[in-house]
Amino acid sequence: MSSCRSCLRISCRSIRLLRRKPECQAPSRFIHRLPMASPTMKHGSEMKLSGAFTVFRCQSRTMFIQTQETPNPNSLKFLPGRQVMESGTADFSSISEASRSPLARLLFRIEGVKSVFFGPDFITVTRVDEDVDWKVTKPEIYATIMDFFASNLPLMNEKQEADSGSASDEDDDTVAMIKELIDSRIRPTVQEDGGDIIYKGFEDGIVKLKLLGSCTTCPSSTVTLRNGVQNMLQFYIPEVMGIEEVKDEVDAISEKEFAKLEEKLVHGEKAAS
């Protein structure tokens, strides 16, 4: 029984690894050298190494930003080598939501950025689609992150209220166990992939969860929820009958408007041809 429990590792990445071909190689590493304060600089020299590492260097100081691929091909995880969020996480799925953070606003100014997510020590940026070239977009993201942290401005305009769904004294035993399992076994793994998962409720045996960051648009998210999260919760907590992904009203509106924009662009291309 214990050996089975140790195998219950969930995340978009773990599901994808099961499907990965043996000949697949590890992500590549990149080194960038840019002046520490250069808001107008868009590109730097790039050297390909065996891994995912980015270096910013100037005469007086050096900033290291590590980049990491995620299971979502349209999301990249940036690790600036310092704390990002003091507590909790922050998700920005639209420009209007980015008004809460100066850094999020700056990142949304970069062409091709669809959403931004802040974790404890990382920033996940999701592009609109695969037509947006990371080779063009990444240097702008690097420079924006570097210049922002060099400015010592606050990350959020006001104190961020944590929405992690952590256990509280008001929870009954079942809910407390669900929250504890999510916080200790599930969220850390999902955050490694540049996303997060938040407890939103438990009703009639159904656990309601919200996906954030790279997991929001990940093609493997449904498989992850059903084959990973649900199986783990049911294994440890018999009261759990199933799970349900929920979205805030703002998320639903943003997704609907983005779908309309995509449809409009497709029709425009067909008309032009």
Image: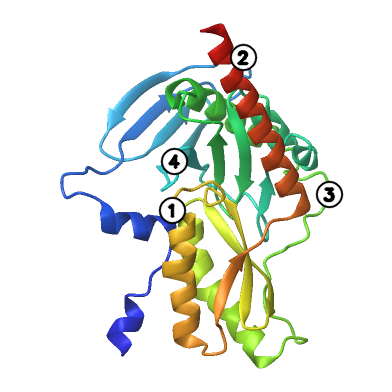
Earlier along the polypeptide chain: callout 1 or callout 4? 4
The one nearer the camera, 212 or 36, is 212
- Tell me the kind of residue under disc 3: Glu
**The N terminus lies in which quarter of the figure?**
bottom left
Look at the image and tell me whether residue 266 can be seen.
yes
Left/right of residue 189 with respect to residue 112 in the rendered view: left
Label 2: element kind? loop
Q: Is residue 37 above or below residue 172?
A: above
Label 4: element kind? strand
Earlier along the polypeptide chain: callout 3 or callout 2? 2
Q: Which mark is residue 66?
A: 4
Of badges 1 and 3, the one in the foreground is: 1
Where in the figure is residue 115, as x and y percent of width and height?
Answer: 62, 39
Q: Which residue was labeled with disc 1?
A: 220
Cα distance between the residues tagged 2 and 1: 37 Å
Cα distance between the residues tagged 2 and 4: 22 Å
Question: Residue at horizontal 41%, vertical 68%?
Answer: 227
Question: Residue at horizontal 37%, vertical 22%?
Answer: 46
Q: Residues within 10 Å of mark 1 (few under 14, many from 20)?
A: some
Q: How is the image coloured?
A: rainbow
Earlier along the polypeptide chain: callout 1 or callout 3? 3
Left/right of residue 119 with respect to residue 34 in the rendered view: right
Label 3: element kind? loop
Q: Are marks 1 and 4 in contact (CB under 8 Å)?
A: no
Q: Which residue was labeled with disc 2?
A: 40
Where in the figure is residue 192, as x and y percent of width and height?
Answer: 46, 56
Q: Is residue 195 above or below residue 198?
A: above
- Tell me the kind of residue under disc 1: Ser
Q: Residues within 10 Å of mark 2 (few under 14, many from 20)?
A: few
Left/right of residue 22 with respect to residue 72 in the rendered view: left
Q: Which residue was labeled with disc 3?
A: 158
